[in-house]
Image (cartoon, rainbow, N blue to C red):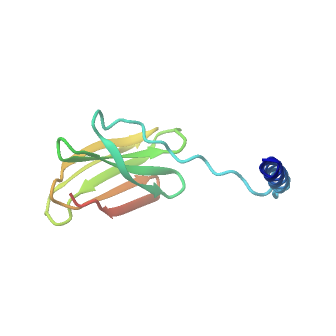
Amino acid sequence: MKTMKLSRRASAATALAALTIGGTVAATAPASAAPSAPAAAYNGVCGTGYKVIDSTPVGNVGTVYLTWNESTGKNCAVTIRNTPGAKILMSVKLEIPELEDTWASDADQYTTYAGPVYLSSRGYCVQWTGQIGTASGSDYGHCG
C-alpha cells in the first residue's frame, strides 16, 4: 500500500510539473499569434428532429451545417457567420446532384445566417454549399 501511495504522489507531482511547464510554454507564445474567431455554432434553426450530421467551413468566416431528420427523410442546411455584423451576401444551397433540378437554396443580404433550406433526400447523396461574401465552402456525401 505504501508503494501505491508513493506512486500516486509521484504521478500527481509529474502531472503538476507538466501542467506548470505547459502553462509556461503557453504564456510565452509569440504576441503575433492572433486568435481566430470561434467557429459558428449550429443555431437549431432547422427545427425539432434535425440533428447535425456534418459541417464545412466557409473560408474562415463561417460554417455551413448539414442536418438530417430520420423521421421525415429530409436534410436541412444553413450557413452561419462566425461573428454577426453588417448585412453581407450570404447563401446556402442543398442539392441532389444525381437528380437534375432537385435543389433548394437561399441567398440574400443577411447579418447572421442564410437558410434554412430543406430537401427530401432519402435514398440519395446530397451536396451542401455555403457562401459568405467571397468565401465559400462545399461538400458532398451522406447518402441515405
- Direction from residue 10 to residue 33 in the image, left or right: left
Number of dots carrying numbers: 0
Q: Is residue 99 left or right of residue 57?
A: left
What is the residue that sits farthest to the bottom in this orientation? Answer: 98
The image position of residue 15, as x and y in percent, is 78, 52
- Farthest top residue in view: 48
116 up-or-down from 23: above or below = above
The single residue placed furthest to the front in the displayed view is 1
Q: Position of residue 14 (x, y in %)?
A: 82, 54
Expressed as whole percent of the image width and height from the top left, the position of residue 1 reads 78, 47
Residue shown at 45% from the left, 38% from the top: 112
Please state the horizontal and vertical placement of residue 95, each as a whole percent of the image.
Answer: 23, 57
Q: Is residue 102 left or right of residue 137?
A: left
Q: Nearer the viewer, residue 10 or 72?
A: 10
Quarter placement of the C terminus: bottom left
- Seen from the viewer's position, the closer of residues 7 and 13 is 7
Say which residue appears at 18% left-offset and 41% top-offset.
71
